[in-house]
Image: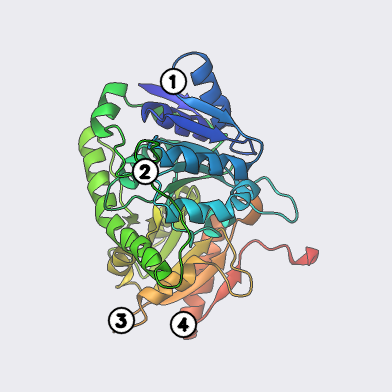
Amino acid sequence: MKMVLRGNMATAYAAKLARVEVIPAYPITPSTLFPEKISEFVANGEMNCQFVKCESEHSAISACVGASATGARVATATSSQGLALMHEILFIAAGMRLPIVMAVGNRALSAPINIWCDHQDTIAERDSGWLQFYAEKNQEALDLMLMAFRISENQNVLLPSMVGMDAFVLTHTMEVVEVPDQKDVDEFLPPYKPLYTLDVNNPMTFGAFSSPDNYMEFRYATQKAMENAPAVIDEVFAAFEKKFGRKYSRVVPYMVEDADIVFVAIGSMCGTVREAVKEMRAEGKKVGLLKITTLRPFPKDLIKKYLANAKVVAVFERNISLGFGGAVYPEISAVFVNAGQRPKIYDFIIGLGGRDILVSDIKQTYDIAMKAYADGKDDVIEWIGIKKEML
């Protein structure tokens, strides 16, 4: 069934279709529409779910941990400062191997206060042990949310997932979305069957104290689960395509086969970059786009496959690792550390705090990157769109 939905509503419909049993939440712009829609579903009797209205984001994720430990399928939503307030519990959820799924409206972090889009909030949590998926469109937000449950609940993974949607660009913008039938979703996503649960009749401890004698082994087990995840993600993406006809990949190449320069991007900006690629191709410039859908686990195998033949890689970052540069740039660079042939990799900070990303900006980065390549430069970190008169 086709519906016109905002991104937040798309993820709420995904939670409903997934038959989520517990949703603790605390409202924060621009994710508030998710708990609002869930509360409607529950109040109208459309969703058999325990909706827990919490007093903070820290409380919401803590309630998620408790509910998931009992064996319930659990989801929530947050954004920006709310995700930051969850920080310590994110590590606990991953360390306890709880397959919680969270929709995140990607929003800039304060200070100064800003409610518009960038990826700093989820990028800041990339080391917490959560799988990370990023949507370009509202359809992807719904689909990735559905698939995240099946991926996270796989016994070879058992890690929580977050699905990122660009603030307002997706969370509040209405698009036509294909909402699957409940019957088809039930066939694709069976009920969650946990290996271990909190049970008064069979007591056990979750997240117990760990001494130096065994703490490393727990971290190693979590890392191995992350290493298992790519195969599971590929398997679930393939099953989703077979069931619903929409194809997904951990990275999505566009015109990269013969490209001299490949742009790497995440989220809604990929549409703008794709349009710029079309225009520059018409001008005779060999350019391409590599869209990253899955940032954690980092898709290093596919990154290497699709970027190996490029002369230049230009990484667009809607984040900043202060004191260095963008966070994705060094990870792509690390893929090629021991490679015999490697592209020049340049970093572009763009669109922070909801700053518009224009086709002209993408064309500007092409000029900067190709000049740096001609000059033989190895390191370029440029800020695009800065108003220098304000500095």
User: Which disc, if any, is residue 148?
Assistant: 2
State the SS at label 2.
Answer: helix
Instruction: Identify the mark at residue 374; answer none if there is no mark.
Output: 4
Say how many tags the image has. 4
Residue 355 visible within the image: no
The image quadrant of residue 237 is top left
Badge nearest the viewer, 4 or 1: 1
Tell me the residue that label 3 is attached to.
339
Using the rendered image of the protein, determine whether residue 70 is visible from the camera's viewpoint. yes
**4 or 3: tag closer to the N-terminus:** 3
Q: Is residue 344 left or right of residue 240?
A: right
**Residue 63, percent from left and from top:** 53, 39
- The crowding category of the residue bearing disc 3, from other C-alpha atoms within 10 Å (few below 14, some 14 to 19, many at least 20), is few
Report which residue position mark 1 lands on. 47
Of the two numbered discs 2 and 3 on the same chain, state the one appearing first in sequence: 2
Which residue is situated farthest in the top direction here? Answer: 44
